[in-house]
Image (cartoon, grey):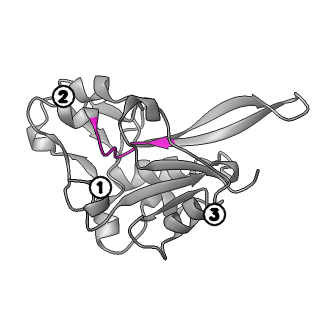
């Protein structure tokens, strides 16, 4: 189905220059979803990126990453059992644990490194945009705990939504690895020049 024809077009808009690297999103997600303690197992994380400012001095920027809930999701295409699938009504990419055989094909196909093998359950896991929370009118756990309002979630079909307005007002908008043809639904924006 064409993404623009869906009832909902859920997306995450990350205002990257607002992220302070506090890791509240990471902790909230681990707690909400009982993600194993191992640092290699995460549904979301925050990368530290070393950059240089305009004067050439080193600085650190923070980059929240998660499943991009791609419109053209390679993880769904390679899943041999159909455990990885995309919901028609809103585009959220999910995994049905009872169908997952832990083959890791989806992990290999994901260009965002957004999946991990839960070794305790022998199934692959990933961000779901906190589907149970959003189904009850709540924000995803990572968004609800983001102290800097770097993470924003909503429906791009709703012109009054925060994500729609952020994308409209942003000075710069980018999506990760767009050249891969995945059509990701996580946007990184700058509100300043």
Q: Earlier in the sequence, mark 2 or mark 3?
A: 2
Q: Which is the main secondary structure of the residues drawn in magenta?
A: loop
Residue 121 appears in view: no
- Disc assigned to residue 59: none
Neighbours of disc 3 within 10 Å: few (<14), some (14-19), many (20+): some
Q: Does residue 105 sit above or below 162 in this rendering?
A: above
Query: In the rendered image, which residue does mark 1 sit on?
Result: 3
Residue at 70% across, 38% down: 61
Residue 169: give its label: 3
Q: Where is residue 163 in the image (x, y as percent from the top left)?
A: 51, 64
Helix, strand or loop for disc 2: helix
- In primary-sequence order, the first of circles 3 and 1 is 1
In primary-sequence order, the first of circles 1 and 2 is: 1
Magenta segment includes 67: yes
Q: Is residue 175 above or below residue 41?
A: below
Q: Does the magenta stretch include residue 75?
A: no
């Amino acid at each position: 189905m064409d993404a623009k024809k869906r009832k909902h077009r859920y997306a995450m808009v990350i205002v990257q220059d607002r992220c302070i690297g506090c890791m509240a999103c990471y902790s909230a997600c681990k707690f909400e979803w009982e993600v194993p303690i191992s640092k290699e197992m995460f549904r979301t994380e925050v990368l530290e990126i070393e950059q240089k400012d305009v004067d050439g001095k080193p600085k650190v920027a923070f980059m929240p990453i998660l499943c991009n809930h791609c419109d053209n999701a390679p993880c769904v295409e390679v899943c041999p059992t159909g455990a990885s699938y995309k919901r028609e009504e809103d585009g959220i990419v999910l995994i049905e644990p009872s169908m997952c055989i832990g083959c890791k094909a989806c992990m290999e196909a994901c260009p965002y490194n957004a999946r991990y093998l839960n070794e305790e359950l022998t199934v692959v896991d990933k961000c779901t945009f906190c589907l149970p929370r959003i189904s009850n009118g709540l924000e995803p756990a990572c968004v609800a705990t983001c102290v800097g309002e770097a993470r924003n979630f909503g429906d791009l079909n709703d012109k009054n939504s925060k994500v729609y307005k952020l994308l409209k007002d942003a000075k710069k908008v980018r999506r990760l690895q767009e050249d891969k043809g995945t059509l990701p639904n996580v946007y990184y924006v700058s509100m300043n020049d």
